[in-house]
Image (cartoon, rainbow, N blue to C red):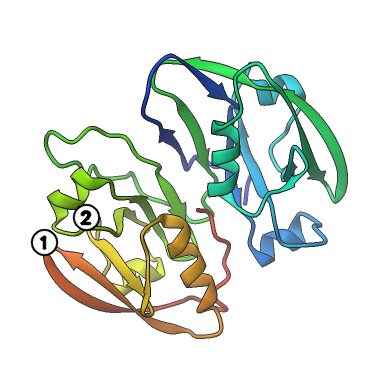
């Protein structure tokens, strides 16, 4: 992936006042990308963007660094990493264990703050994602965690109760955009679909979609159950190559 990928989105978190802010874009680590980054093990999150004058920039973090531990805790993926950042008070120093060009080092970071609704940029998609169409029901506030997956080729978000009522489901994962030429597009997935199951595995968050797709790597084709316009539908998704083109959730 070329540095500075333009496919960067944002975590819009509820609440106001001063909140912790690291100022990085991050992406999941795939097997292929792990080898490119000279990682000994496939875990952690790759930094795909560093905001100017942010806590990350001041600490010397760089695009291509892989955060593998947060305060001594192993980082398994983006959802966990986001939670750790959100739970850290602004102004507190944390130690990040990173891998840079295959060399492990510890970097102290003093967590910054952002006032008002927090924005935490993330992304680093490997596919050429198109401009994201708005899938926004009326009178529902935009409070969500956008999450992009290049292995499947979608950008998605978990449903809150209001969104669930609007789309006629109690739980699921809303597809907000579909990448051109991706397995998702070829299968017929569209923005506005709500994913319910991936190969019989119920999904309620973007991270669960990632796990279910990874679990099906040995298989080239698997069914995806979804809700479209309040009607249930099942589509068959066929992965490209070995199904491991690099998750970016």
Q: Nearer the viewer, residue 38 or 164?
A: 164
Q: Counting other residues with Cα less than 10 Å from the Cα at mark 1, is it few (<14), some (14-19), or many (20 or more)?
A: few
The part of the image, by quadrant, that contains residue 98 is top right
Name above or below for residue 214 compared with residue 41. below
At 58% from the left and 27% from the top, the residue drawn is 23
Looking at the image, do the residues carrying marks 1 and 2 touch, with CB atoms under 8 Å apart? yes
Q: Is residue 96 left or right of residue 181?
A: right
Q: Position of residue 176 (x, y in %)?
A: 30, 50
Label 1 to label 2: alpha-carbon separation: 8 Å
In the image shown, does 180 or 105 lie closer to the viewer?
Answer: 105
Q: What is the x, y in percent for residue 183?
A: 40, 71
| Label annotation for residue 6 | none
Residue annotated with mark 1: 229
What residue is drawn where x is 52% and y is 39%? Answer: 122
Q: Residue at x 59, y 25 (%)?
A: 51
Please tell me whether mark 2 sits on a helix, a strand or a loop.
Answer: loop
Is residue 215 placed above or below 109 in the rendered structure? below
Specify whether 14 is left or right of 56. Answer: left
Earlier residue among tags 1 and 2 = 2
Q: What residue do we see at 59% from left, 33% from top?
A: 85
On screen, residue 56 versus residue 176, left or right, reads right
Secondary structure under tag 1 reads loop
141 horizontally vs 77: left or right: left
- Give the image location of residue 160, x and y in percent: 27, 46
Query: What's the mark number on residue 192?
Result: 2
List x then y, in percent, for residue 61.
Answer: 73, 31
């Amino acid at each position: 992936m070329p540095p500075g990928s333009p496919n960067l989105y944002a975590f819009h978190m509820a609440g106001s006042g001063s909140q912790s802010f690291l100022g990085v874009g991050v992406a999941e680590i795939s097997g292929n990308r792990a080898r490119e980054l000279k990682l000994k093990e496939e875990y952690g999150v790759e930094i795909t963007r560093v905001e100017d004058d942010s806590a990350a920039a001041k600490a010397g973090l760089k695009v291509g660094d892989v955060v593998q531990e947060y305060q001594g805790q192993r980082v398994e993926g983006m959802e966990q990493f986001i939670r750790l950042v959100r739970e850290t008070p602004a102004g507190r120093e944390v130690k990040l264990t990173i891998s840079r060009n295959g060399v492990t080092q510890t970097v102290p970071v003093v967590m910054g703050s952002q006032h008002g609704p927090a924005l935490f940029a993330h992304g680093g998609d490997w596919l050429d994602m198109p401009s994201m169409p708005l899938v926004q029901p009326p009178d529902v506030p935009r409070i969500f965690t956008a999450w992009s997956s290049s292995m499947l080729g979608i950008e998605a978000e978990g449903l809150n109760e209001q969104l669930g009522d609007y789309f006629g489901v109690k739980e699921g994962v809303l597809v907000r955009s579909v990448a051109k030429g991706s397995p998702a597009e070829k299968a017929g997935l569209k923005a506005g679909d709500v994913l319910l199951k991936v190969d019989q595995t119920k999904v309620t968050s973007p991270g669960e979609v990632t796990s279910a797709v990874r679990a099906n790597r040995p298989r080239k084709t698997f069914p995806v159950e979804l809700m479209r316009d309040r009607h249930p539908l099942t589509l068959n998704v066929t992965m490209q190559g070995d199904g491991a083109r690099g998750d970016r959730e």
